[in-house]
Amino acid sequence: MLFEDLFAISLIPGVGDKTLKKASEFITANALLNASDDELADVFPTKKAADIFCTSFDDFRALAKQKRQQLMQMGAVILHRDNSKYPQRLLTNPDHPVFLYCLGDPEMLNNRASAAISGPRKPSQAGIENAKRTAISLNSHGITVISGLATGIDTAAHSACLESGNTIAVLPFLTPVYPPQNEALCNKIIEKNGCVIAPSIEQFNIKFQLLHRDKVIIGMSDSLYVPDAFASDSGTAYTVNYALNHSKAVYLYKNGRYTKATNS
């Protein structure tokens, strides 16, 4: 299916990556428009979404053109999963998004080695210093630091990489910058030839999008470093478990050093 048509389908309310991956199996949008009711039910999450596609697809093609122009004005690039600049590590993860929206240098997305740094939004002072030291050490070995631009540990990790520019911020959505207090940091990452990406253009379900962001971070990384203590029911705990379940090396900072975690 043409990139333009698949992007238009992505804008239909209720459509996510599962739908886009199934829609991609059709050679053209017209083939999908001519599909049987059973085939449409298999592709779309609801009958309402299928009906919108069948009755209003031309409207979404026009909307897609507008969105692409808006993204171009922002300096953003749309990366389809077939694009050579799409992060190849992420493709090995079954949860990979069909589209990524990128600001900055997309060449970074396929750097030789990468590691994620994650942790609480309200860290200890020691955790902040650990995050900075970890990020600087990783960068000094040519390893790209990936984090989520959240307050706390993420902010410390990205900030420590600004001199080298060797960092990637993964947002839950591209615009507006989330969290808003890190907009200046986001702009600095781009200015320093780093990269900012998101699997969605705009906010629609913040809880889901934050979890999706975390999956992208882990999917792009070879390993995960957690430089501060975290609660067992926190977003950091979710990220750690997700990384372990996807066979990533996870290092937790305890008693003055990093210890490799196990999936027990």
Image: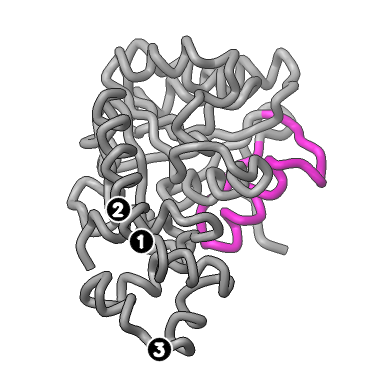
Q: Circles 2 and 3: CB distance less than 8 Å?
A: no
Residue 48 rendering spot, x and y as whole percentages: 57, 68
Residue receiving disc 3? 36
Residue 3 rendering spot, x and y as whole percentages: 23, 57
Residue 105, placed above or below residue 39: above
Packing grade of label 1 (10 A; few <14, some 14-19, many >=20) is: some
Q: Circles 1 and 2: CB distance less than 8 Å?
A: yes
Q: Which label sits on residue 61? A: 2
| Residue nearest the viewer, comparing 194 with 10 | 10
Image quadrant assignment for residue 88? bottom left
The magenta span reads: 228-252
Residue receiving disc 1? 57
- The first of marks 3 and 1 along the sequence is 3
Report helix, strand or loop for mark 3. loop
- The first of marks 2 and 3 along the sequence is 3
Specify whether residue 89 is in view.
Answer: no
